[in-house]
Amino acid sequence: MDPVLAELADAHGVATWFENSRRERQEIAPDVVRSVLGLLDVDASTPSAAAAALAEQKRRPATGTLILREGQPAPAGGAVTLEDGSAHTGGPLPLGYHTLVEGDVARALIVTPAALPAPPRAWGWMVQLYALHSASSWGMGDFADLAEVVRRAADDGAGFVLLNPLHAPVPGEHVPASPYSPSSRRFVNPLYLRVAEIEGYAAAKSTVDGLRPARTGDLIDYDGVWAAKRAALERLAPKEFAFDDPALRDYATYAALAERHGSDWRRWPEELRRPDSPAVARAREELTELVAFHGWLQSCAEEQLERADRAAADMGIGIVHDLAVGIDPGGADGWLLQDHLAQGVRIGAPPDAFNQLGQDWGLAAWRPDRLDAAGYAPYRDLLRSLFAHAKGLRVDHVAGLWRLWWVPPGGSALDGTYVRYDPAAMVGILALEARRAGAVVVGEDLGTVPPYVTEGLGERNMLGCSVLWFTREAADWDTFLPSAKWPVNSLATVSTHDLPTAPGFLTGEHVRVRDELGVLARPAAEEAAEARKDRDALVELLVTEGFLVDADAPDEEIVVAMHGFLAATPSRLVAIAPYDVIGEVRQPNLPGTVDEYPNWRIPLPVSLDALFDDPRVRRVVSVLRESR
């Protein structure tokens, strides 16, 4: 590659090569680099343009955000105004968001924690909230079910409950099932509201109860649940709602406009595509009742989440929320934060052994330069909204705080490259907001992740993830790692939502269903043989370490032994997934499929009312309680 183009790309955080899943150097085509630079408003279309852009970059003074770690000295020669508005007069800078003035230039100065307090050694539950169902919920789990799970888990001595993302989906009659493609990560999915806990329900009970959907089939019907809840909520909603939060008013405005013009703001009439336009202000007045309705839904969600928070008050940690890696570019955050996003970019992953064409997740990406210029305010606001109801946060695809694979408009995942973010800012601000909330942080660092990601998490006392299927000897993939050698700074689990459940792994269901759907990367016989070998190796380890008496034990005994093994590891956190314990062979999500598999629609085979009293659950809980 031309050295000037390479230097220019590096100056703007655009990769010209990367290490693939086999740790081999993979070059990026120059045209891809030029395209991505163009998305950052850098003209590299010709050699002369690239040279001029590089010269301009070198002349440009530093005006972006200055990130310091706790204990680092204040910059010399500038005046610092602290977050509380007072002037810094000497000594160490406190944690927080300050302003540095040097001459005529003011820039954001953020002081982040060196590390979070070490998380406690605890066990808890890893719950897909939608999969719960109780005698009082309407066709899927809800916030009241969450409060009940928290109460029962706390009674058993659990220290936390980890949830799937509760982000707001795109509005409309069709509700997307995936919690990882949200319209907004700052607001909450009203589908999880418990209708019977809404103010005014008692007076309208006879009418509202008649709207409750009948449960049919063995899959969750999101559209049917929302149609029923929407009808009930409209009967209970006030005609007016006072907006104390401008951000909530803006979100509610998007939701109202989306009901009139479709969920993708990029297809709205031109005059409505900017949230600060006069046309949007007029539309907000015209749609007053609908805007109020969506604002009220969020206030109801806040109230019900607060009840769940109170139920978790005696837990060692509490409720741990999940942050999806990105957003639907046509959704609410795509509209409201459009100036901070790379327009047309979709994030994903480069090709690897299992996805030879790479992955295109269709999600929007932050522009790192725009975040920097804004003092990271949109990112700070996002984290603060999540920590308002979280004592922990799991960050999906945490490597995205360091770099993301950008797919330019019109291209495929093969046409992408990595774009660098500033981890001192992205990880540091995460640590700052977590410190202020008294929360723990778990980074999902599974798969092909550069070592510096896991190391960077560890430096801040943030946890990575260790999954039983993947935690093996570095030099010998066929050998599972003994319990004593598991990492301390991790959340240890049997599986994840994207992997086989424990019963599915033991029975080979993950091979059977992939073969049936045609998504295997090699012949089914080879996959089945590999699965049997993995099963035998894992069972042998459980026997060797004394968690299982007999290699021919029933699967239910092996599942208990798996959790005993996790409990014995030095990992700070251990999580149980209901699917693993109660015999469900279907995994919640099957990567590589969309409609071919019932992703995110599989309910638990037992009701919440029976879950915690199930003998299989009691055995596993007993093992965790004794060890932790």
Image (cartoon, rainbow, N blue to C red):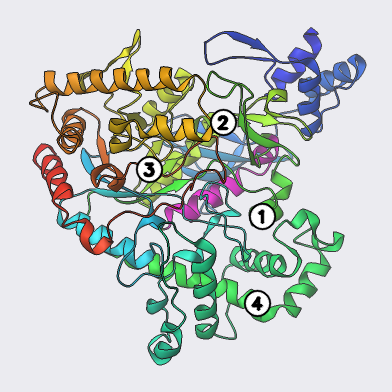
* Mark 3 Cα-neighbour bin, 10 Å: few <14, some 14–19, many ≥20: many
Q: Which residue is mark 4?
A: 290
Q: Which mark is residue 331?
A: 1
The picture quadrant where one finds residue 173 is bottom right
Q: Are marks 4 and 3 in contact (CB under 8 Å)?
A: no
Alpha-carbon distance for marks 1 and 3? Answer: 30 Å
Amino acid type at circle 1 is Gly
Q: Residue 559 location, x and y as percent?
A: 20, 36
The residue range painted magenta reads 369-388
Q: Residue 308 location, x and y as percent?
A: 32, 63
Amino acid type at circle 3 is Arg
Amino acid type at circle 2 is Pro
| Side (left or right) of 142 relative to 523 | left
Q: Which mark is residue 75?
A: 2
The residue mark sitting in front, 4 or 2, is 4
The residue mark sitting in front, 4 or 3, is 3
Quick check: is 474 in the magenta stretch? no
Q: Earlier in the sequence, mark 4 or mark 2?
A: 2
Query: Is residue 74 visible to the viewer in this orientation of the structure?
Result: no
| Side (left or right) of 513 relative to 53 | left
The residue mark sitting in front, 2 or 3, is 3
